Image: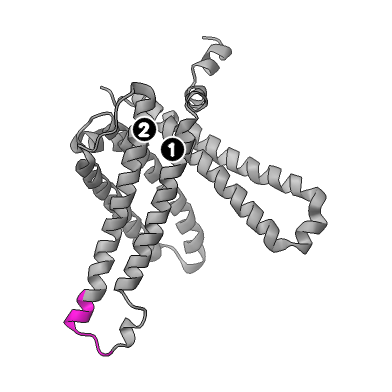
Amino acid sequence: MSLKEKLMNSLFLKTFNLIKKQPKFLIFALAFDFLFVASVYGIGFLMGVLIPANIFSAGPLNAKMILAILLPLIVYPLILLLAYSFFKHVILNFVKSLINDEPLSFKRFSEFYFLNLIIFSAIGLVTIVIGIFLRRIANQQAFSIVYMITITLIFIFSYTWVNISHSIFTDGKSIKETILKSYMPVFNKIHSYLPVIIFSVIFLLAFNGVFYILAMPFKSWVFSHPTAYATIFKAISFITIYLTFMFNRLYFYLITKEKLGSSS
């Protein structure tokens, strides 16, 4: 196969073409992501109402007060996960409909929520255990560097695992099949998804470089208006990062379907 044929058949190009043919995906995903962020703020506000700021100065702790503190702290992440699962479920079904033209269904939503509960509980537990382990073996000076490197690797593998498992589940697999089929490719098929991770990192670094170069002619304005410059940079950075993550949603679904055996 020639280089041109490889490029034309690459998942990168397939993903770009799919977005190009279905621009409504961008609008749809943006709308639901915005609603998710709004729901997070809404849930946070509700928790703030349920847990008054002066609760610790209300007097000595008693069983009722402890329950009033612990119950929202336990319920809060579960509600957040419910909101995340709802919006992610809708977007994943829409991604699937771009290829298979299937209607939105919530028949398996409870299973999807439970799958996310298992995945994020496992990620949280592993992160805590590794953090404790590193704290015990690393000296104070090296801990910060080692911890940051470790957290970055955990994020990459976790991000990959979440996307692969969601794609497999969306293709009709059970929770058990999804977990069994998703965690191994994260480690033994790194070559399949590593290009999109490298592409994402290079793209974001290139954006920072281009933005810096474009700002050079306006150096005097930048120094005299640092707040405005920072605001513009943050806004454009957010848009760039968001578009990268949106591209990756489609890419991981396609790669899971074609190369990681979600259909088998």
User: In the image, residue 230 lies at what x, y percent?
Assistant: 66, 58
Q: Can residue 189 be seen in this view?
A: no
Judge from the rendering whether residue 6 lies leftward or rightward of residue 39; answer left or right: right
User: In the image, residue 47 lies at what x, y percent?
Assistant: 32, 68
Quarter of the image holding residue 174? Answer: top left
Q: Can residue 33 be seen in this view?
A: yes
Of the pair 26 and 196, the residue shown nearer to us = 26
Image position of 145 with respect to 104: above or below: below
Q: Mark 1 points at which residue?
A: 28
Asked which secondary structure carries label 2, the reply is helix
**Residue that appears at 57% across and 14% down:** 3
Q: Which residue lies furthest to the left in this view?
A: 63
Asked which secondary structure carries label 1, the reply is helix
Q: Upstream in the sequence, badge 2 or badge 1? A: 1
**Residue that appears at 52% across and 25% down:** 20
**Badge 1 amino acid:** Phe
Q: What stretch is highlighted in magenta?
A: 59-67
Instruction: Please say if the residues under marks 2 and 1 sit with CB atoms less than 8 Å apart.
Output: yes
